[in-house]
Amino acid sequence: MADKLKDRVAAVTGAGRGIGRAVALALASEGAAVVVNDYGVAVDGSGPGGGPAQEVVDEVVAKGGRAIASFDSVATVEGGESIVKAALEGFGRLDILVNTAGILRDRDFLGMTEDEWDPVVAVHLKGHYCTCHPAAIQMRHQRYGRIINFSSPSGLLGAYGQANFAAAKAGVVGLTRVLARELGRNAITVNAIAPMAETRLTEGLSQAVSVGGKPSRLGTPEQVAAMVTYLATEEAWNVNGKVFYVSGGGISLAYEEDMGRAINKDGMWSVGELAAVLPRALLEGVANPAPPPPDLPIPGRAQS
Amino acid sequence: MRSTEQADTETSSTSTPAGALEAKVAVVTGAGRGIGRRVALYLAQQGARVVVNDPGVSPDGTGQDQAPADQVVAEIVAAGGEAVASHDSVASMEGGSRIVSVALDTWGRVDILFNNAGILRDRMFIKMNEADWDAVMAVHLKGAFACTKAAAAHMQRQRCGRIINASSSSGLVGNAAQSNYGAAKSAIAGFTRVLARDLGRYGITCNAIAPMAATRLTVGMADMAAKYGLVIPEPEYVAPLIAYLASDAAWNVNGQIFYVFGGSVCLAQPPVARRTIFKPGGWTVEELIEAVPTQLTQFTDNPGPPAEHLRPAFARPPAAEAMAAPHEGAE
């Protein structure tokens, strides 16, 4: 075992499977004591059951590491508090929080129901609030902490049929940016990862992704876990408020969504002026991600 | 010009020229005050018939008052436009559905939806409670979902529609004490990007704005700006951009986020990959400790750097500590 995280205590949500599991194992292999949290639900969030968290704990312990299981849902304030409490009671502190817990209920927006929107937002976005809040209080007390949140390319770039998931995952980035600003002074860093990896949630996607016409495999959870582990180290003390794409051996820093191309006028624009100036000045080379089909009569299209 | 017919009929003698939005029906949420009010007035001036929605709550979402929405309707009607009031909250599916129903029941269609309603409960994250988080999420995020769900099906049937969401630099860039609001507003950016993809094929566009304007919600910010001799621009500046995005001319503008403040309109930088490191097979932690600061995050700011004495020992410049003492002594 390596010792980059010796004496550190981590909590990893959704750690029973997929990326969370790989993260828990990676942090433990660097010497961290780990709360392995997993509610044990199906991909769509239904049917909680205890299994996977304990299995990962057993795996960590078998390798000589320290870990305890937690079976709470992140989607309630009580659940989040209970996860942090498990770290404090089990290991006396909490240095690292990794928020990988997540579910999916994909549907085209026109067919999406409130029952598909609410649970996905509850687990991903409220779930980040529920764990970050008690963790931030403890980390501020310690004057040390590492929070690693999980966003998604879907939230950052857009994807069909994932209005619920993408909204929640983009929300995680906004939360990350605010927390980085608020907590940084106390030696707490807050960053986000937008991963692409083969897990239960991306089954089928790996077939659809192709590079140069050939089906391409997504990265592995272990490759994502390496970046999470790096962000959890003391050496990453000055990496804060950032968003990283991780896909296989590729790791990218995302642009911030600040102001890009601009048009300025002294005074109010008219609609006509904007129609004449805006597309040329701001949208040159910017594609419409889903233009209307050519045979659909679109008012305004004939003129342009 | 396609609007000739309308211009020739009744409205040609009023002070407004034939508008870009003749015959269109718009729903503006949170239209009783601030940006929403200005947008409702402007859309009406451009010829749109407008549902002026506002439950008349205080900035933190409490209370209720029908007067703000009713007054804006009266203003529009007095100027020769068409408008009806709606006092429902956007924060439930039923509310969203009722708001859109006002447009359908009154004018039989809905062409434009501006999801503008919002509240604030600013607080440092450590002090934030669940009620502050939930209330802000409910109005901004669930509210946008509820109204958009109600409108999108009709827009699909019409094979035309314009959805414009209100995001904010608070979420797109980050602002202390607004974790609830910032998270909701960046979520709306993500929501917008998917709506653009899901609905574009039906002739519907979905875009978002990140406005900066002097309203009830930015009073604190205005005071801060004043200290630096800055003035936050009036909300009326936001209106022409909304009207443009709602117009036929913007049929191919979809999935974008625009900052708008005063006479400035900026395209938000999409959060695509800025710098990339690649290693076949993946990286080790030791390699990342070397590579990330030198190849990925170099020349970027830490938006919340740790206090000097809380940096790890290896990152504390010994020179800085040595120099600090004589400085203090000299004063």
Image: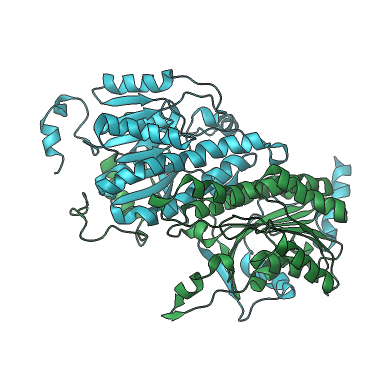
Chain colours: A green, B cyan
Q: Quadrant of the N terminus of chain A?
A: bottom right
Towards the viewer: A159 or B124: A159
Q: Is residue B166 left or right of residue A30?
A: left
Towards the viewer: A96 or B296: A96
How many numbered marks does the figure carry? 0
In which image quadrant can residue A46 be found?
bottom right
Q: Is residue B135 left or right of residue B208?
A: right
Q: Is residue B230 left or right of residue A148?
A: left
Q: Quadrant of the C terminus of chain A?
A: bottom left
Counting from the top left corner in percent of width and height, residue B258 is at: 42, 47
Counting from the top left corner in percent of width and height, residue A12 is at: 72, 59
User: In the picture shown, does residue A139 fall above or below B280?
Assistant: above
Counting from the top left corner in percent of width and height, residue A204 is at: 49, 71
Q: Is residue B163 left or right of residue B132?
A: left
Counting from the top left corner in percent of width and height, residue A140 is at: 79, 46
In which image quadrant can residue A223 be found?
bottom right
Looking at the image, which residue is at 53% across and 31% down? B217
Q: Is residue A186 visible?
A: no
User: In the picture shown, does residue A287 fall above or below B309?
Assistant: below
Q: Is residue B58 visible?
A: yes
In which image quadrant can residue B264 be found?
top left
